[in-house]
Amino acid sequence: MAALIYLCLQFLCFAFAIIGTRAQCPPGTWELLVENAGIASMHTAVTRWNTVVLLDRTGIGLSNISLPNGECRDDPTDLALTHDCSAHSVLLNLDDNSIRPLEILTDTWCSSGQFLPDGTLLQSGGNDDGTTKFRTFTPCASTCSCDWVELQNITLSQGRWYATNQILPDGSIIIVGGIGISSVEYFPPRPGGAVNFPFLAESGDNQTDNLYPYVHLLPQGNLFIFANNQSVLYDYNENVIVTFFPQLPGGPRNYPSAGSSVMLALEGNYSTATIVICGGAQYGAYLNQSLGIASSVNSTANGSCGRIVATDPNPAWEMEDMPLVRIMGDMVMLPTGDILIINGAQAGSQGFGFATNACLTPVLYQPDQPEGSRFMMLNPGSIPRMYHSTANLLPDGRILITGSNTNYYYTFTGDFPTELRVEAFSPDYLSADNSNLRPVLVKTPQMVQYGNLYNVYLTVPSSLAGILEVNFASAPFTTHSFSQGQRLVKLNITRNVSQVNGQYRIVFQAPPNGMVAPPGYYMMFVVNQGVPSVAHWVQLTS
């Protein structure tokens, strides 16, 4: 279906060009950045040094890139290759699209991650010898040789596979769920037990649909935790469930039937938080496939979205339909507050070979539009991005697209071979037609403290007019169709001042506290009439 849509759109573009009308192709453009990254990135995170960490698993044998200087990893517990001289993590330099191999020691299959306040990437759990491990990657300039470090003095109390990480207002990390685990734990560890979440436990039907739960930190400090079709409001300080939200209609939404989820941009007085969850698989698509019922690979995915104001005293789900059904899609928060839904398939479920009919067409979700007018279909890509693919916002406003491996090992034959290419998708705000509106940041603070006022200086090719925003976008850890820790905070602007030298000065107020924006590094965008600048990295601290 996606291929048919792609061909039809291309034909229409050609036809419009022939008849000389002003009609345009669907918005957005694609570009190939790297022909061969060496690995298929299952986990992806953008660092403040304009680099990107790409990470796969170790227990699959050789990748397509070697470790440097003849280095090798010896692991007698590795199920595929006990002596492995290939890399399973690489660093992409966005300045020149070069690739540098990194060394990861234990298996990171279906692990989780989050950036700490100092910009260090914390990575936790995985499979086999990595299930209780913590690893860190402290980013550095592209001329340096930073690499992964496995922590020796601190481990997870129990193995966490398919868990979710979320940074908290004090800069610590909460780790939620995992196979057979209905509790949480923290980094650094903290004393005391944790409440059990029954809907995160095994249900006995081999399709629990509760892995990689969706976790969002609300601006009042509590956590919204969602798995399968159930969700709660959790006060982690008091260790109690505050609210049980209504059940989301439409079937399961988490792994192995995952759609995706975002919290809409926080703005105004930051008292309102809205959660959106889109897509998923039909119940039974995964279970039947695992039982050998091959036809379930063609089971049509879910096309509905649920939207709930989690801070409302009487919350209820508002339902609407996407223009395309989709499983394994990634929901990426754009600098404008709109949502890009990209990657995935239109049939089947998550798992090796369990899905088909790649969904090549991205969709833009515009949350501020009225119901029925929020979705826009964009320019389709040509490379299937299905199981184990990722999508991440870059500081220049593009979306980095990596990975896709529907096979247990690296396999370069068949309908959906292992994908080593890296692409970028440019939303319409980066089109040439919008270049005169794009702000250029001249001077920004490097560090801001909660609640204080700061200046940002910028130029705009045309006059500065209309809606102007200063927005902080986090750098999440993206895996399995969910960006852990993703959030966008629209800052309050006190005044705009036009300068004699042609620059504009904007005075903005930093977020009020760590509940609205946890401490750490953010991409600071200035958005002029829906067109974002290239971001500057800013450290938010107390």
Image: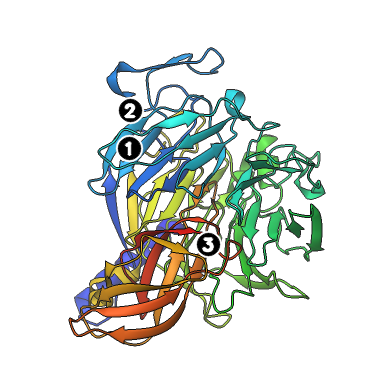
Label 3 neighbour load within 10 Å: few <14, some 14-19, many 20+: many
Q: Name the residue under label 3.
A: 487
Q: How crowded is mark 1: few (under 14 residues within 10 Å), some or many (20 or more)?
A: many
Q: Is 186 or 34 nearer to us in this picture? A: 186
Mark 1 and mark 2 lie on one chain; the one further toward the N terminus is: 1
Residue 484 rendering spot, x and y as whole percentages = 55, 51
Which amino acid, by three-letter code, is at mark 1? Ala
- Marks 1 and 2, Cα distance to the nearest angstrom? 8 Å
Report the residue marked by disc 1.
Answer: 37
Indicate the quadrant where residue 493 lies: bottom left
How far is mark 1 from mark 3, CA to CA? 28 Å
**Circles 1, 3 touching at the beta carbon (< 8 Å):** no
Q: Earlier in the sequence, mark 1 or mark 3?
A: 1
Q: Of discs 3 and 2, which sits in the foreground?
A: 3
Q: Is mark 2 on a helix, strand or loop?
A: loop
Sequence-wise, which precedes: disc 3 or disc 2?
Answer: 2
- Please tell me the numbered disc located at residue 65: 2
| Mark 1 touches mark 2? (CB < 8 Å) | yes
- Check disc 2 and give the amino acid type: Ile
Q: Is residue 106 visible?
A: yes
Which one is in front, 167 or 202? Answer: 167
Separation (CA) of disc 3 from disc 2: 33 Å
Q: Which amino acid does label 3 sit on?
A: Arg
Color encoding of the figure = rainbow
